Amino acid sequence: MTIARALTIAGSDSGGGAGLQADLRTFAFHKVHGMSAVTCLTAQNTLGVQGVMPVEPDFVALQVEAVAGDIGLDAVKTGMLLNAGIIARVARLAAELPLPNLVVDPVMVSRTGVQLIDDDAVVALKNKLLPLAMLVTPNLHEARLLSGIAIETVADMQTAARRIAALGARSVLIKGGALAVGRGTDIWYDGGAWVVLKGDTIDTPHTHGTGCTLAAAIAANLALGLPLREAIVRAKAYVTAALRRSLAIGRGQGPVGHFWPLLGDADG
Ligand SMILES: Nc1ncnc2c1ncn2[C@@H]1O[C@H](COP(=O)(O)OP(=O)(O)O)[C@@H](O)[C@H]1O
Ligand SMILES: Cc1ncc(COP(=O)(O)O)c(N)n1
């Protein structure tokens, strides 16, 4: 049996809702074989991040090389890359291997505004990795860091997307999960065309893992051979369905739910 193959280069979330755990789960629900190169361990739960332990950049690279050289890659997604050393190493790998259909989720700031990576990593992401991405998927905080402008409206998102495209990313998807008005509206810009993705607003506090899930679903769809626009539209529908089935577990922000198709819940 042949199967599409996708790799996530990301951090581990011990709570299982975000990070590589969300990515591998998303790949599986797209019938894509998932592989992982771990960049860091986080001790994390629904209440927040209690600790972070980095992996050496060369060992991140070794994990990627091990699977690229043997199993092969149809698409690659990056998540929490943590520090400038790991980002520079991943950028070098992208030049050496290459890393096909590269979706960069520039995990820097959580939806709640907590910075998840080192300060010099923000600069490295901007200068070294964005220019190599087929698609970059910042949330509103990350789009502000990358573009330098404050974002409150869909019009601000469009201005920011233009600026981020000017940094060299081939296309930009700004996620509006934190929009005060129209939460769930995302915009995609590829240097020419605009697409406004108007998702339904789901009224839930349990949104942990939305960004990881969206970017992983896009990578899975690209691995399956879909064109980028279709890959994004379908991934958006996937994350909206998962938000509708989000899980009220833990004492804080629970994760989005992926299992509903297995539970006989058919109207996603
Ligand atoms: N309450 C919500 N209702 C509908 N869509 C949402 C909601 N929260 C997040 N999303 C969607 O989830 C995806 C991830 O966005 P966001 O939560 O902003 O990213 P991140 O997890 O990286 O902070 C986007 O498609 C966004 O529109
Ligand atoms: C290891 C790790 N990676 C990424 C995120 C962001 O998660 P979200 O998808 O909720 O933005 C996270 N909280 N932890």
Image (tube, helix red, strand yellow):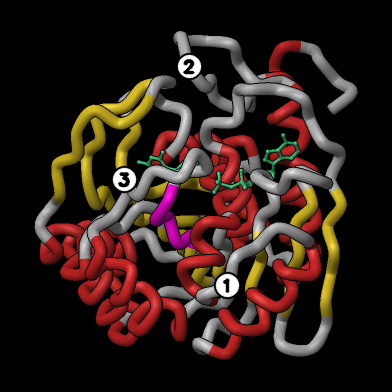
Q: Measuring 60% from the left and 65% from the top, which residue is drawn there?
A: 150
Q: Is residue 89 left or right of residue 76?
A: left
Q: Is residue 8 visible?
A: no
Disc 2 marks which amino acid? Gly
Image x and y of residue 69, in percent: 29, 68
Q: Is mark 3 within 8 Å of ligand 2?
A: yes
Kindly identify which residue carries mark 1. 149
Q: Earlier in the sequence, mark 3 or mark 2?
A: 3
Kindly identify which residue carries mark 2. 252
Image x and y of residue 136, in percent: 55, 69
Near-viewer residue (189 or 74): 189
Q: CA distance from mark 3 to mark 2?
A: 20 Å
Q: Measuring 46% from the left and 85% from the top, which residue is drawn there?
A: 131
- Specify whether residue 137 is painted magenta: no
Q: CA distance from mark 1 to mark 2?
A: 30 Å
Image x and y of residue 99, in percent: 41, 74
Number of the front mark, 1 or 3: 1
Q: Please tell me whether the stretch drawn in magenta is mainly helix, strand or loop.
A: loop
Q: Is residue 183 visible?
A: yes
Disc 1 marks which amino acid? Ile
Near-viewer residue (245 or 149): 149
Q: Earlier in the sequence, mark 1 or mark 3?
A: 3
Kindly identify which residue carries mark 3. 11
**Relative vertical location of residue 222 with respect to residue 109 in this rendering, above or below:** below
Near-viewer residue (210 or 118): 118
Q: Is residue 23 left or right of residue 267?
A: left
Disc 3 marks which amino acid? Gly
Q: Measuring 79% from the left and 12% from the top, which residue is drawn there?
A: 264
Secondary element at tag 3: strand
CA neighbours of label 1 inside 10 A, class few (<14), some (14 to 19), many (20+) = some
Number of the front mark, 3 or 2: 2
Magenta stretch: give its range: 105-109
